[in-house]
Image: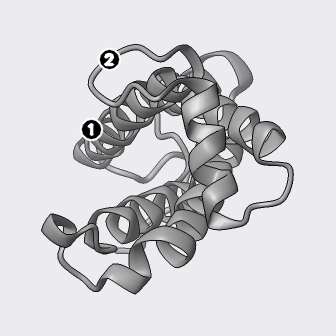
Amino acid sequence: MPETRSTSTDWGIALVRLALGVIFVVHGVGKLFGLGPTATGLDGFAGFLGGLGVPLPELAAVGVALVETVGGLFVLAGLLTRYAAALIAVDMLVATILVHFPQGFAVSNGGYEFTLTLFLVALALVFLGSGALSVDRAVLGRGRTVPTVG
C-alpha cells in the first residue's frame, strides 16, 4: 500500500515522541536510579506507593520505574512505540486516578492537568504509531498510520 501521509505528519509524530519520551526518561531515571530533577529512588517511590495503599509497593515501584525509563527510551527511538505508549498511558491513567484527581485540575495544586495530558498524548501515539522517522519503520517496516483520504 503506498504511503499517503505527509512529511509534516511524520515530523509532527516525531516531535510528539520526543516530548513524551524525554519526560518519561527523566521521571523514570529519577525513580529507578535516584538521579535528576525528579529523583526519589526506588525506596522513596515504593514508600510513596505504600502510603497510597498500593499492594506490593516495592514491586510496583520497579514496574513503574521500568515502564517510564524503558518506555520513554522506546518512544524516543520509535521502537515498539504503540506498546510502549500503551504502557505509559496506563501508568498515567493510574497516576491521574490515584494521586492527582483528588487534588482537582490545576497542576499547581498537585492536580491532574499534566498527567491527563500525558495520558492523552501517549494514547494518541497508540493510535498514530511511530511515524516514518522511527526504528519501527527503518528496521521493522512498521509504524505506518492509516492512510489519509483526499
Quadrant in which residue 35 is drawn: top left
Can you tell which of label 1 and label 2 is closer to the viewer? 2
State the separation of the CA atoms marked 1 and 2.
23 Å
Give x and y (percent) for residue 84.
65, 41
Q: Quadrant of residue 58?
A: top right
- Residue 59 located left or right of residue 122: right
Spot the residue most to the left.
Answer: 108
Q: Is residue 88 above or below residue 67?
A: below
Q: Is residue 86 visible?
A: no
Query: Is 106 situated above or below 142?
Result: below
In depth, the one of 47 and 12 nearer the eye is: 47
- Label 1: how many Cα within 10 Å (few below 14, some 14–19, many 20+): few
User: Residue shown at 68%/29% (left/top)?
Assistant: 66
Q: Is residue 110 left or right of residue 118?
A: left
The vertical placement of 30 against 71, above or below, is above
Three-letter code, disc 1: Leu
**x%, y% of residue 128?**
51, 57
For numbered disc 2, what is the local secondary structure?
Answer: loop
Q: In terms of depth relative to the viewer, which is nearer, 104 or 118? A: 104
State the mark number for residue 15. 1
* Residue depicted at x 54% and y 14%: 33
Q: Which residue is mark 2?
A: 36
At horizontal 64% and vertical 62% (from top left) the residue drawn is 90
In this picture, residue 42 sits left or right of residue 75: right
Q: Is residue 106 above or below residue 148?
A: below
Does dot 1 land on a helix, a strand or a loop?
helix
Q: Quadrant of residue 68?
A: top right
